[in-house]
Image (tube, rainbow, N blue to C red):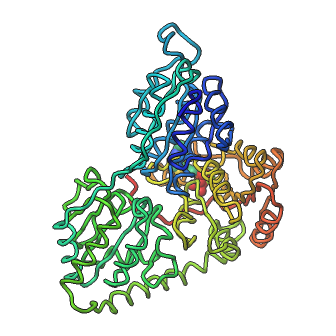
Amino acid sequence: MQGGGGQLVMDTLARHDVDTIFTLSGGHIFPLYDGAVKRDVRIFDVRHEQTAAFAAEGWAKLTRKLGVAALTAGPGVTNSVSAVTTASFNGSPVMVLGGRAAASRWGMGSLQEFDHIPVMRSITKTAITAPSTEEIPGVIEAASIAASVAHRGPVFVDLPMDVLFGFADVADLSAPVIPVAMPNPEDTARVGQLLAEAKAPLLVIGSDVYWEGAWEALAHLAETAAVPVIPNGLGRGLLPADHDLAFSRARSTAFKNADLVIVAGTPLDFRLGFGKFGDAKVVHLVDHPDNVANHVEVEATAAGDLGTIFDEILSAFEKKLQRPPDRTAWLDRLRQSEQEARAADELVLQSDADPIHPARIYGELRKRLDRDAVVIGDGGDFVSYAGKYVDSYLPGHWMDPGPFGCLGTGLGYALAARVVHPDKQIFLMLGDGALGFSAMDFDTLVRFNLPVVGICGNNGIWGLEKHPMQKLYGYDVAADLQPGCRYDQVVAGLGGHGEFVTSPDEIGPAIDRALESGLPALVNVVTDPKDQYPRSSVLA
Ligand SMILES: Cc1ncc(C[n+]2csc(CCOP(=O)(O)OP(=O)(O)O)c2C)c(N)n1
Ligand SMILES: [Mg+2]
């Protein structure tokens, strides 16, 4: 391997299938651009570094491969902190490459001289400064592997200017190996036994099942043992929403009445009532022993490759039970609950209310959604409705911010989604508050000719904050935005397509025109600020 520092970085990353980077310009990282140009790596440059880092994370979420952002020294890197933390919470394999003031002048006060490592170390799996040009391949390789091995997460490498602008001729690296940890067979056997004994078992699956590529093993286990499945995060779509064993709207019935809840590949956090499911026994299956919940008493756990865990549970289950269990009553009960909830949804999905009920937007969207559409959510209440009303049918086609709950992920995720899937529908559901964090990156979509349809649920407030503050204090502050603000004109001004909608029957035609425009578009729908998402979960 030989060449300038940037070429060495790109040559090493190519071994991990990296052919695209997200960035915002800075002199400290010019050699990375030169390396990308010389190695045919695509460069997408954005309007705020957080969008670059969210796009890198989005890339990882869409492809299950390493996503890469290149950010300039100092403020370029620090602007990525929330996005990198989001990747850490989501277990997303992301690499942030940072510029860095020259090592030879360190401490003399160079422009943007800042030691990123202590900041980034706390939110990454590894944060390291490349010590010399010769050592770039080794450092990038080690960081790539660290990001990609379970439990996955972001990594950070900064490259001092004098290191990155140097040249080197170094020996080629051997082929990359991503180690896979195998579970303890006694642990999986115990889970298989619990599953054979259970009358009303439930399988809750999260993002790590996706990251591990374990959806076929999951389907095989669920189908053979007749276990209903409830997804969260990137677990959505691993079983198609119309699969017999896939449930989403029967969550509370399932959680209240199950006698065994097996949670796989997601923490027992606020999204899952902190791991308390009535009187059910709880099993936690994780991709790494560090992730076993220690705040609840679990009946059993297994840690390691999740596909192998599912396979081993199934063979233990089959050894225990000669014929498939009869779960008809349990599955019928859940199906009934699912159907009732879905039938009740129709009321708001078809609502003619004026001002517009936000759920009506999803009613119109559903009629137009392709089975392989990618739907992205960025916002408060408006996105909680998305979680409820949007069904996913394929792995990696639903993108929410995850448990870090950071507003502003949307434009970065949408940018990545359009690049990864040039021919699929990409819908970006935005709260009006959330939109403000990265609206300027509609410009990026325009510059790169990446038509995404954004739909803004414009209630003129920070809804998920205003209503709770009202409830707690009887008044609210710092919770209002401009009512009816013309964000569509902002997008049109940036060269995109804008639609402004104030009555329910205009929503569908506006979405159609946005799709037909072939441009990055925003359908700005003024919704009822009095509406509040009916939330039952405890968030903190
Ligand atoms: C970066 C960031 N800042 C603040 C918050 C707190 N927060 C969570 S939801 C929310 C309101 C979002 O408003 P909007 O996007 O308009 O959606 P709505 O609830 O009105 O539908 C806020 C401020 C957050 N989660 N992330
Ligand atoms: Mg709002």
Q: Which of 480 and 247 is in front in this view?
A: 247
Residue 141 horizontal side relative to residue 448, left or right:
left
In percent of width and height, residue 420 lies at 63, 57
Q: Nearer the viewer, residue 239 or 89?
A: 239
Using the rendered image of the protein, determine whether residue 433 is visible from the camera's viewpoint: no
Question: How many badges with numbers are in the image?
Answer: 0
Residue 460 horizontal side relative to residue 497, left or right:
left
Q: In this view, does 134 lie above or below 125?
A: above
> Which quarter of the figure has residue 336?
bottom left
> Which quarter of the figure has residue 142?
top left
In percent of width and height, residue 290 lies at 26, 50
> Which quarter of the figure has residue 321?
bottom left
Q: Nearer the viewer, residue 371 or 528?
A: 371
In percent of width and height, residue 263 lies at 32, 66
In percent of width and height, residue 22 lies at 62, 41
Q: Which of 511 and 57 is in front in this view?
A: 57
Q: In this view, does 401 lie above or below 528?
A: above
Residue 317 horizontal side relative to residue 129, left or right:
left
Using the rendered image of the protein, determine whether residue 20 is visible from the camera's viewpoint: yes
